[in-house]
């Protein structure tokens, strides 16, 4: 797990090594254990290292194999690297380290651009084929590891974070009106390849991009489940599906134990993280370190789920860390969290993840987490009604349940200078849901959730906040084989029992019923959900700051209406919209964007 960066020149110029150095330095927290820089004339690579696998210098990056004519920087973890190394040795290859990094290099030497099909894990790879003078960029199937791009005539820069590209300089920081449309429509989500800034894009998940030394490029998606019923599964009853999902999840959890350092668990007390603890215990893990966080209650809303996380910790004898923070910790944490965001993220629990990661990183370098289960196994409330919706009604049903604002409403929010002249969010939604495959409306929405929305909401949130403290978080529910199996699973098994029914049945073999049948919870941070006290002052300050007035993103009358005290009946909706707008302005100002 690391931070990668670099610059390629296609016009005969020399890459700006100082710019690459600035990018690497901006990602020091992602890789506090080492750094490296390598130049090959037309390209310069930078790397910050977090030592997880092969702690020796032999695993350092940028990694160069002169005998193979290859060089690479890589962020992430390839869980099946021991098996791949054995396979490649049998094919006649040699290795000089025990790292997964070198396995990727040798895999490319053996299989060329098809190397990605052999990797099981989370990764962003930038590989240099020196003989062909070719740059190969690849991102893992579910977009767990990020890769941001800034292109200009004759030049391509890339980095693990957007702020790193800002540190390099010479970036178009104008607001992208289409991205702003998405941000204000979809709970602050801006799907790949866009970002909120016009001059920075991100490589989409499951994508390989090949760039030649003259700047010509091609791109392909190398993996995408079709969300249809597979004839190979014909005749499988509910019990058969439960067994298959249970086996796949056990494999996913075991895969993510690969490390030369201890692996902990972020234990919220919900079904998903509790299942991970149970399966790790089943796999023979002893003295497992688990971590839960809680905040002050507010307005009758509890600020922790310690009752459930304590129950799970006791049941499996974990070394449990209960982290209790007060609301006084939140306001300064919001400022630090915003700086750590690779992109503006409006979810209120992003601050909680930042604070949790800070504490967890004091004990372990790697932790497993339950992110992704709701998207993969239909755990959200809006999934249930979709079973009654015809296939061609998926877009209308999803928009009604998920959209923050309609296109018409956005005209009342956004200044005309930043307005999108078409309903970009609805058009993108319709195109994805209408794509071939996906038997039912629910299949189509789960495909959308998992492959478009998820990489740029919970996945990005966890990566940004954990890596701000040099913590690697692994997500078993986003294992490629488990996701493909779930995509083929009949929807009725997933929506059963109020959502995630098939997971609940698997869990009954190991977890207390109280954990399985509890009401669905979310990361509770009452003071942020209600945007009051010092946090409200911080958001207000950002929206009325000179930089915000000069930028003029939002209509002044709309901002004034949000800042006025909402009545009690509209408090929740008004506060969420206030947080969404204020967070964007706060992020832009924190990163010096004018």
Image (tube, rainbow, N blue to C red):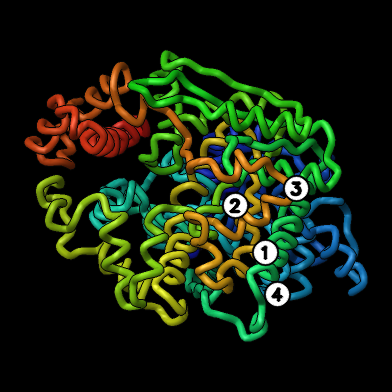
Give the residue number, with chain letter if any, for mark 3. Answer: 279
- Residue 20 is tagged as none
Secondary structure category for the residue under label 2: strand
Residue at 46% across, 38% down = 522
Q: Is residue 259 above or below residue 544?
A: below
Q: Which of the two labelled residues, at mark 2 and mark 1, occupies the earlier sequence position? A: 2
Residue at 37% across, 72% down = 433
Q: Which of the two labelled residues, at mark 4 and mark 1, occupies the earlier sequence position? A: 4
The C terminus appears in which quarter of the rendering?
top left
Q: Which of the two labelled residues, at mark 4 and mark 2, occupies the earlier sequence position? A: 2
Q: Residues within 10 Å of mark 1 (few under 14, many from 20)?
A: many
Q: Position of residue 582 (x, y in %)?
A: 26, 33
Estimate the spatial distance between the alpha carbons at disc 4 and disc 2, rounded to whole Å: 22 Å
Q: Nearer the viewer, mark 2 or mark 1?
A: 1
Give the residue number, with chain letter if any, for mark 2. Answer: 44
Q: Position of residue 88 (x, y in %)?
A: 86, 69
Marks 3 and 1 in Cβ contact (< 8 Å): no
- Residue closest to the far bottom: 231
Estimate the spatial distance between the alpha carbons at disc 2 and disc 3, rounded to whole Å: 43 Å
Visible in this render: residue 212?
no
Give the residue number, with chain letter if any, for mark 1. Answer: 242
- Residue 112 is tagged as 4
Q: Nearer the viewer, mark 3 or mark 1?
A: 1
Marks 2 and 3 in Cβ contact (< 8 Å): no
Q: Is residue 528 left or right of residue 304?
A: left
Residue at 90% across, 63% down = 94
Q: Position of residue 77 (x, y in %)?
A: 70, 51
Secondary structure category for the residue under label 4: helix
**Splitting the image into 4 quarters, where does residue 278 fall?**
top right
| Mark count | 4
Estimate the spatial distance between the alpha carbons at disc 4 and disc 3, rounded to whole Å: 36 Å
Q: Is residue 348 above or below residue 306?
A: below
């Amino acid at each position: 797990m690391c931070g990668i960066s670099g610059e390629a020149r296609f016009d005969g110029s020399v890459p700006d090594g100082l710019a690459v150095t600035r990018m690497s330095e901006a990602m020091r927290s992602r890789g506090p254990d080492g750094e490296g820089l390598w130049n090959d004339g037309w390209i310069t690579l930078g790397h910050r290292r977090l030592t997880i696998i092969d702690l020796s210098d032999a695993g350092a990056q940028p990694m160069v194999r002169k005998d193979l004519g290859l060089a690479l920087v890589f962020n992430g973890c390839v869980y099946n690297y021991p098996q791949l190394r054995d396979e490649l040795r049998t094919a006649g290859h040699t290795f000089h380290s025990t790292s997964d990094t070198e396995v990727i290099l040798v895999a490319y030497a053996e299989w060329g651009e098809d190397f990605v099909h052999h990797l099981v894990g989370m990764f962003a790879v930038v590989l240099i084929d020196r003989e062909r003078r070719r740059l190969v960029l690849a991102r893992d199937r579910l977009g767990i590891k990020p890769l941001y791009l800034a292109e200009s005539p004759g030049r391509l820069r890339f980095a693990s974070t957007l702020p790193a590209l800002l540190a390099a300089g010479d970036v178009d920081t104008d607001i992208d009106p289409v991205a702003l449309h998405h941000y204000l429509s979809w709970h602050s989500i801006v799907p790949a390849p866009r970002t909120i800034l016009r001059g920075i894009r991100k490589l989409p998940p499951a994508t390989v991009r090949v760039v030649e030394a003259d700047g010509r490029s091609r791109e392909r998606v190398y993996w995408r489940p079709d969300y249809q019923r597979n004839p190979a599964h014909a005749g499988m009853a509910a019990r058969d599906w439960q067994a298959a999902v249970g086996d796949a999840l056990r494999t996913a959890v075991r895969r993510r134990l690969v490390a030369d350092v201890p692996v902990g668990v972020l234990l919220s007390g919900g079904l998903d993280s509790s299942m991970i603890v149970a399966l790790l215990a089943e796999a023979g893990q002893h003295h497992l370190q688990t971590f839960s966080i809680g905040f002050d209650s507010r307005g009758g809303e509890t600020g922790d789920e310690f009752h459930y996380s304590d129950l799970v910790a006791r049941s499996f004898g974990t070394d449990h860390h209960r982290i209790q923070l007060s609301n006084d910790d939140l306001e300064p944490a919001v400022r630090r969290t915003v700086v750590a965001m690779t992109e503006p993220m409006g979810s209120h629990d992003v601050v909680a993840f930042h604070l949790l990661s800070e504490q967890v990183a004091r004990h372990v370098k790697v932790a497993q987490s339950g992110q992704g289960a709701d998207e993969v196994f239909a755990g959200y409330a809006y999934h249930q009604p979709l079973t009654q919706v015809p296939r061609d009604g998926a877009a209308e049903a999803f928009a009604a349940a998920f959209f923050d604002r309609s296109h018409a409403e956005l005209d009342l929010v956004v200044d005309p200078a930043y307005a999108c002249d078409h309903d970009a969010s609805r058009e993108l939604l319709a195109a994805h849901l209408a794509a071939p495959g996906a038997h039912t409306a629910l299949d189509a929405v789960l495909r959308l959730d998992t492959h478009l929305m998820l990489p740029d909401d919970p996945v990005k949130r966890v990566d940004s906040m954990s890596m701000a403290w040099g913590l690697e978080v692994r997500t078993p529910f986003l294992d490629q084989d488990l996701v493909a199996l779930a995509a083929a699973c009949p929807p009725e098994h997933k929506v059963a029992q109020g959502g995630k029914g098939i997971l609940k049945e698997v869990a009954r073999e190991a977890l207390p019923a109280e954990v399985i049948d509890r009401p669905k919870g979310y990361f509770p941070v009452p003071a942020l959900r209600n945007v009051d006290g010092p946090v409200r002052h911080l958001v207000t300050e950002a929206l009325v700051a000179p930089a915000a007035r000069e930028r003029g993103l939002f209509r002044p009358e709309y901002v004034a209406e949000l800042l006025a005290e909402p009545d009690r009946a509209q408090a929740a909706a008004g506060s969420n919209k206030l947080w969404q707008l204020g967070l964007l302005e706060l992020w832009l100002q924190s990163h010096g964007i004018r």
